[in-house]
Structure formats: structure tokens, C-alpha cells
């Protein structure tokens, strides 16, 4: 699950498109829908709500997927340099 903390039921993500700020969190509560027609109805399915007035999005889910962050790519140049450095040190130590 995206929220590996114990006793967490849901994962949440809010996106502020004005400031390009993404906030991810875990929660022990259910996913709820707040609207003018209802007071915090519990949703049993994952939900994402867009608010055009505030240019924001809020997502809530019960499993993996709604608040995950992209996995950083491996820098091939850094791996190559570190590998060469390791080989150089190893060959130097093996001569001693």
C-alpha cells in the first residue's frame, strides 16, 4: 500500500494546481465526499474530486495507486562512475 504505516486505512493526495504543490498523506478514516447536498458521505470506492474554483484536486483511495509518487530514474552516468571507481579501488587493494 502507498501508506505503509500501521493501522492506516486510506491514502490521500491533494494537488494545488496554482502552486504546483502535491501533498500525500495516510489516514485512519474512510474516504468521504463533501458536497452541498450531503454531509461527508463515506465512499467505498476510490474518489478524486476536482474543484475548479480553487484549481485543486483531492484523491482518496483504499489501496495502492492514488497517492504514489513517481520512482526516480537511475542516473546511468553516476552508476558508471561509481562502478569504475569500485573497480579501480578493488584492483589497487588486490595488488597489496
Image (cartoon, grey):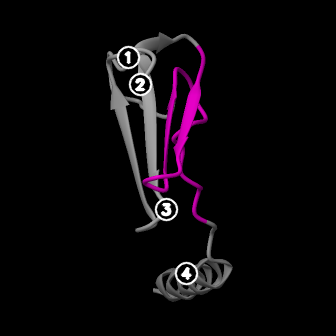
Position of 47 relative to 79 (above/below)? above
Pointers 4 and 2 in contact (C-beta within 8 Å): no
* Residue matched to label 4: 82
Q: CA distance from mark 4 to mark 2?
A: 51 Å
Q: CA distance from mark 2 to mark 1?
A: 5 Å
* Residue matched to label 2: 34
Under circle 4, the secondary element is helix
Under circle 3, the secondary element is loop
Q: CA distance from mark 2 to mark 3?
A: 20 Å
- The earlier-in-sequence mark between 4 and 2 is 2
Under circle 1, the secondary element is loop
Residue at far front of view: 37
**Image location (x, y in percent) of residue 19:** 40, 68
* Residue matched to label 3: 17
Residue positioned 65% across, 82% down in the render: 80
In which quadrant of the rendered view does residue 74 lie?
Answer: bottom right
Position of 32 relative to 59 (above/below)? above
Q: Nearer the viewer, mark 4 or mark 1?
A: 1
Amino acid at each position: 500500500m502507498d501508506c505503509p504505516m500501521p493501522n492506516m486505512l486510506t491514502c490521500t493526495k491533494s494537488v494545488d494546481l496554482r502552486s504546483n504543490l502535491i501533498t500525500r498523506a495516510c489516514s485512519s478514516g474512510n474516504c468521504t465526499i463533501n458536497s452541498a447536498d450531503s454531509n461527508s458521505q463515506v465512499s467505498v470506492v476510490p474518489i478524486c474530486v476536482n474543484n475548479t474554483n480553487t484549481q485543486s484536486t483531492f484523491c482518496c483511495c483504499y489501496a495502492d495507486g492514488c497517492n504514489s509518487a513517481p520512482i526516480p530514474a537511475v542516473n546511468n552516468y553516476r552508476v558508471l562512475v561509481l562502478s569504475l571507481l569500485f573497480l579501480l579501488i578493488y584492483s589497487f587493494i588486490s595488488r597489496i
